[in-house]
Amino acid sequence: MVIKHLTDDEVQQYAVDKSNSEKRIGEHIHLCEECRSKVKVYQLLITEIKQLPQPAFDFDLSELVVQQLPSPKEKTSDWVLLWLLLFIGVGFIGIILYYFEGSFVYLFNGIAAIFIYLMIITALTVFTGLFIDMYKKYDNEMKLLDSY
Amino acid sequence: MNNITGQNTTDRNLVERILKGETNAFGIIIKNTENLVAKIIFDMVVNDVDRKDIAQDVYLKAYQKLPGFKFQSKLSTWIGQICYNTCIDHLRKKKLILAESIFETETDPSNDILDMMNTAQGNFDEPVDTFVIGKNISEIVKKKIEKLPAIYKTLISLFHSEELSYEEIGAITGLPAGTVKSYLFRARRELKNDLLLHYKKEDLWS
């Protein structure tokens, strides 16, 4: 009589999670001493693994990490700085316009509208490019600092 | 610190509190996930000093990335993922290879240790555990697990000790659930084979 034993994976599956094993596997194990003994070995192994001592840090990780976290004030300081820069920028442009308004009108008087648009578009493109580049550099430097 | 239990506080509430600037709430998250992080680090990194540095690094990274966490997985799984990746980066920096060779050099599956034992017993009636008198099963299992490659050690630990599902382990390690399952089968087979090299199978449960 030829007995086809279960594969090792089937034996393991039964040992790990009997309830999710195929019915035929359970039936075979019930009848086959050889496969039943293999299941027992795996079950013993799993029990041993579960009983192994759990690793733990010998220091207070929570305290160690929390004291290194940046305070909430530091986080909001970015926004304060941004608003301050914006305020200074708007103020600066306002002062220029107030004192040199006449000159500006004279400056653009003799130029065709298309050239003015061209200048504005060029200036905006250059500033956008510079801003993106500056932000990328800033971001990279921050990442570099964070990696230490 | 003892009054912070966090047992009744959901992850979402904790994250919201931290994002509002309550850094102490992050301590609760650390306490809640420390065991998982310890398991991964202890399985993957040998040096104690490195373990301490990596543990801190994991949580500092998690804190930094917290605004981007969208609750698509459990917070613990997400932190486990950061931990696993940090360990992998560490091993790469140290040029420690995550050897899978232990399984690549695996012998022919038909050459099963059980068969070898049965043959040996049938022919020579020789006990196979004579050279390990005094050693207990736990010690053998522990030593063998320590010898497994880092990835397999971690999988065994996450599945059997932490009782995570294949999917959760897959999310942490970046491996497909099927691969996790397959690696676990291999790792357990290695452990079983090693156990049977030291003990007769009938002695294991007698």
Image: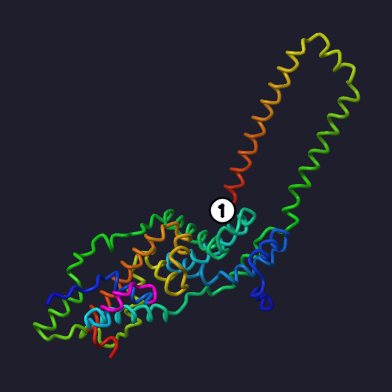
Could you tell me what secondary structure mostly forms the magenta stretch?
helix
Q: Foreground residue, B137 or A45?
A: A45
- Indicate left or right for A65 with B190 as reference: right
Residue at the location (73% across, 59% down)? B20
Q: Quadrant of the N terminus of chain A?
A: bottom left
Q: Foreground residue, B202 or A76?
A: B202
Give above or below for A67 relative to A56.
Answer: above
Say if the magenta span includes residue A39: no
Q: Chain of mark 1?
A: A
- Indicate left or right for B133 with B25 as reference: left
Most extreme residue toward the left is B123
Say if the magenta span includes residue A26: yes
Give the x, y percent position of residue B144: 32, 73
Residue at the location (68% across, 58% down)? A70
- Indicate left or right for B84 with B156 as reference: right
- Indicate left or right for B180 with A41 as reference: right
Which residue position is annotated with label 1?
A148
Identify the secondary structure beneath mark 1.
loop
Residue at the location (41% across, 67% down)? B155
Q: Residue B9 appears in which quarter of the rendering? A: bottom right
Instruction: Name which residue type carries label 1.
Output: Tyr
Give the x, y percent position of residue B102: 28, 63
Give the x, y percent position of residue A5: 21, 74
Give the x, y percent position of residue B89: 46, 55
Label 1 crowd bin: few (<14), some (14–19), many (20+), radius 10 Å: few
User: Which range of residues does the magenta coloring cover?
Assistant: A19-28
